[in-house]
Amino acid sequence: MRLARYFAVASSLALQGCAGLQSALDPSGAEAERIGTLSWLLILFSTAILVGVCVITAVALFGGERWRARIAGERVVISGGLVFPILALSVLLGYGFYLMAPGTTAARSQGGLRIEVVGERWWWRVTYVDETGRRIESANEIRLPVGRPVKLELTSADVIHSFWVPRLAGKLDMIPGHTNTLTLQATKAGISRGQCAEYCGGPHAFMSFHVIAMPEDQFSSWLAGEAGDASAAKQDQAAGQALFLSSGCAACHRVRGTDARGTIGPDLTHVGSRHSLAAATLENDVAAFVRWIRDGQHVKPENLMPPYEIFTDDELRQLAAYLDQLR
């Protein structure tokens, strides 16, 4: 009884890895579905081989003389040790090539939306380029229309990073001075979590992002809003805006529609509407803004934003409230 209970607990813990925002076994994209199919095929085939080997081993150890003589015969050794592996692996390899061939992948978007993603230390610069060539910059989050193939152009500003959203596609390296292309096609609405999959130094483990797949009409409305300037600061947020512009924040960050035109750090024009802060390190709310500004080096050690210890508690709340309303 106790053994059965332990087995049930272990099974439930193992199965938790088969779902979630960052599980390759819970695909929500066309390429990830093909990768999932191939993965399950290999897992089942390998399991069958393991069971077969265990059975043969058990017969060799504990079987009668007749059965042991059979499995020791030259015909069994040649067919099981040579012919079967060649045929089985050839079939699997052929099926893998067929499944992942360019002809079966999502069609490239032609003259439509494309997204430029640049790996930075240690965050993601995201720029949408629409059909007219208009460029809309964001950071640490990607939004996609469901059902439409979208081309991502991936590169790096510093060291080698690797772009990986397990629920949508396989990983692809981001190399300084070189652009790699990845086509994403979300098959259903929802949120997926991505990660830098190449050690890039410093807080590499905290270099994540979210991909949000939206119905086509909702995405079009969102993109139109994202292209606009930041919402005007309300009267009770004017003090926070003044602090932002006068305390050095505007030297690194841009807020369209204001005098903040920095390009070193993430664009903050609509930062309050993003799913998370600091490259998916914190929840997005006023308390998180306060924590990041005051304790950024504790939250994400070695990140390139300098510590700000000049603000009083009231000033921190005012600044955080201003950033939170940038939607």
Image (tube, rainbow, N blue to C red):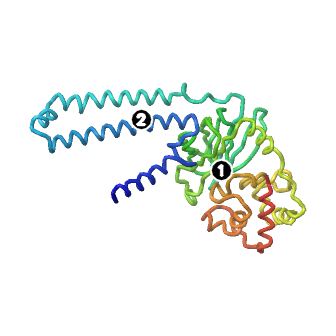
Q: Which residue is mark 1?
A: 124
In the rendered image, the vertical position of residue 88 relative to residue 177, given as above or below:
above
Residue at the location (74% across, 38% down)? 129
* C-alpha separation, residue under disc 1 versus residue under disc 2: 34 Å
Instruction: Classify 189 as above or below 281.
Output: above
Residue drawn at x 54%, y 27% is 104
Q: Element type at marker 2?
A: helix
The disc labelled 1 sits on which kind of residue? Trp
Front one among 101 and 218: 218
Q: At label 2, which amino acid type do we have?
A: Leu
Q: Tell me residue 126's x, y (percent).
A: 69, 46
In the rendered view, would you say 136 is above or below 12?
Answer: above
Considering only order in the chain, which callout, 2 or 1, is on the residue closer to the N terminus? 2
Comparing 163 with 315, the one in front is 315
Q: Circle 2: is it few (<14), some (14-19), or many (20+) Cα within 10 Å?
A: some
As displayed, is residue 126 above or below residue 148?
below
> Which residue corresponds to mark 2?
41
Q: Quadrant of the N terminus?
A: bottom left
Classify 10 Å Cα crowding around label 1: few (below 14), some (14-19), many (20 and above): many
Image point 87% across, 64% down: which residue? 236
Which residue appears farthest toward the bottom when viewing the image?
312
Taking the image as shown, residue 133 lies to the left or right of residue 180, namely right
Query: Quadrant of residue 301 in the image?
Result: bottom right
Kindly identify which numbered label has been placed on residue 223. none
Measured as percent of width and height from the top left, residue 258 is found at 86, 54
